[in-house]
Amino acid sequence: MTLHADHSLRIVVDATDLYSGQAGDRPLEQRNAPAESRITLRSLKAGESMTHDGGKLLEVLVMRGLLGLNGEALGPTSYARLAPGVSATFTSTEASMVYLNERTPTEPETDSYALRGDALDWRQGMVPGLKVTSLHQGLTKHTALVRWAPETRFNPHTHVGGEEILVLEGVFRDEHGSYPAGTWIRSPHMSNHRPFTGPEGATILVKVGHLDVA
């Protein structure tokens, strides 16, 4: 099975129903080649567990709720990264929703760690109104959370290696549309846009430089 496997296409997935509390999973991407990957939004009931066998690299972002990992409580905006070969069991101590990105890495991956959302190091972004916290820096890839104050505008820019965005809070906008919390956007290599926020502001997960370059 493949889903949204062509990285040359811009994809927008509206999962706002799931984010508002509806049970279930929402597949976002599944690829078999050139590197196997599976991206999913998953709702967990209180007390429900999920396991990872360690076969691939796994990224987990807690969108809402509370997730337990090896005795550590991970609340909203918490991030865990497990290198290939590291298995784990996650238990939802309350109704939760998580972003799961499981894949065969294209760069060396040896570090495993978890970052609690209430202890992240937020720093000033490139323009007034932006706060950024880095979650992972690779050779050509970067993963971060970005908080946008209301009525913030960013510079027009081009995505070398593509961009992936997951809206966690508020409403994210650009010249192509408006994206409320629970929306996933994947933009291909060399795409461009000028993002901004309205009165709600926004918090987003951003991954850049990680998509296929044709």
Image (spheres, grey):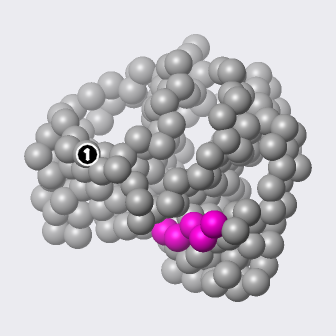
Count of numbered marks = 1
Residue 137 location, x and y as percent?
49, 30
Give, as a single range, the part of the protein colored magenta. 72-76
Question: In the displayed structure, would residue 132 be above or below residue 209?
Answer: below
Q: Secondary structure at mark 1?
A: strand
**Depicted 72 relative to depicted 140: above or below:** below
Q: Is residue 214 above or below residue 18?
A: above
Badge 1 amino acid? Arg
Write the residue at 51% across / 37% down: 136
Residue nearest the viewer, comparing 67 with 3:
67
In what quadrant of the picture does the C terminus appear? top right
Q: Position of residue 133 (x, y in %)?
A: 36, 46
Q: Position of residue 127 (x, y in %)?
A: 14, 40
User: In which quadrant of the rendered image does the N terminus lie?
Assistant: top right
Q: Position of residue 34 (x, y in %)?
A: 76, 22
Q: Is residue 188 magenta?
A: no
- Viewer-proximal residue, 78 or 3? 78
Give the quadrant of residue 111. Answer: top right
Residue behind mark 1: 123
Q: Magenta includes 73? A: yes
Q: Is the residue marked by circle 1 packed among few (<14), some (14-19), or many (20+) residues within 10 Å? A: few
Could you tell whether 121 is left or right of 11 in the image?
Answer: left
Q: Is residue 131 above or below residue 155?
A: below
